[in-house]
Amino acid sequence: MEWSRSGRLKGGTMLFALADYWKYRKQKGKYSDAQLEAAGWVRATETNLQKMADDKRSIAQIFFTHPRHSPVSWAIMYMQGADAITSHVGIIVEERNICEAIISGGVVKRPISVYADGSSYFRVSDFDFPPDVQLNIARSAEEFIGTPYDLSRIARHAGAILTGWDQGGKENYAVYADVLIVLGAMAIPRFRWHKTARYAIPLYLLMVSAGRLRRVMPHRGEWSRPQDWARKKSYAEEWESREAL
């Protein structure tokens, strides 16, 4: 999601988290059945899941899920940005099973039928793997069974998104606005922590600005010459022109 020249948010996303959560609960916009199905998502019924799992080509493919009634799943999608509709992924293995990482059990192998709630959606990648590669990928995934869920890594990643230090994704101005709104509400004198919140607002803005600067500044040893900077500028202009189409 980015700012347009008029100063408005573009990308079809609501600014506030509560508004986006309302859309998720009411299945509006990108969360609607029509938009999900147009994007290739399939309703997670027992029949659809079995039909997919019985296809030998599905082994070693990535299994994407879009749960319908999960606040945690919505938060994951919202933090990812404007167009995110995937909440969870796993690797399909043999005998209608899926290897995935879940908070309660770490990396586990479960029947794919656990997702057959009749209201959620799923999608499967379509990599063209030879049979021997499929088996190798599936067996490699099963080797991780029992690995604990890395909550600390997830927390660090969430913190990086909230503060603008996530180098892998796009700027998420809606999240920044949500954080500032919460801090602004906490800065009201009636609240116990209003003095702390008043100091936190400029500190947060400084962190987001530093994260933004880290995105655009060259890394050490890269883009060090004037011609490199000129090339980087041309890349950025080309990317912006593509997004404008």
Image (tube, grey):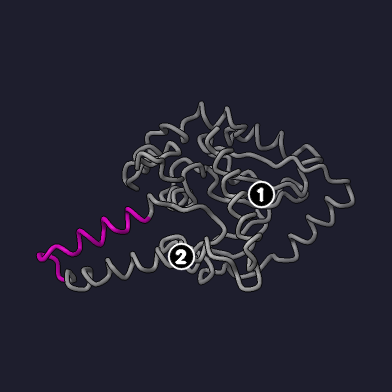
Residue at the image point whose x is 52% and y is 42% from the top? 85
Residue at the image point whose x is 31% and y is 46% from the top? 18
- Residue 184 falls inside the magenta stretch: yes
User: Looking at the image, is 164 positioned above or below residue 23?
Assistant: below
Q: Inspect the image, locate mark 1, and give the three-letter code of the amino acid beneath it.
A: Pro
Q: Measure how far apart labels 1 and 2 are at the Cα level.
A: 41 Å
Residue 111 is tagged as 1
Question: How far across and down, in percent of the image, does residue 212 sit?
Answer: 46, 61
Question: Mark 1, mark 2: which one is toward the viewer?
Answer: 2
User: Looking at the image, is 198 positioned above or below residue 184?
Assistant: below
Q: Inspect the image, locate mark 2, and give the three-letter code of the amino acid beneath it.
A: Gly
Residue 211 is tagged as 2
N-terminal-most mark, 1 or 2: 1
- Residue 130 falls inside the magenta stretch: no
Q: Residue furthest front?
A: 226
User: Residue 28 versus residue 233: which sits nearer the camera?
Assistant: 233
Q: Residues within 10 Å of mark 2 (few under 14, many from 20)?
A: many
Indicate the secondary structure of the residue bearing disc 1. strand
The magenta segment is 176-192
Indicate the secondary structure of the residue bearing disc 2. helix
User: Residue 31 versus residue 216: which sits nearer the camera?
Assistant: 216
User: Residue 209 versus residue 33: which sits nearer the camera?
Assistant: 209
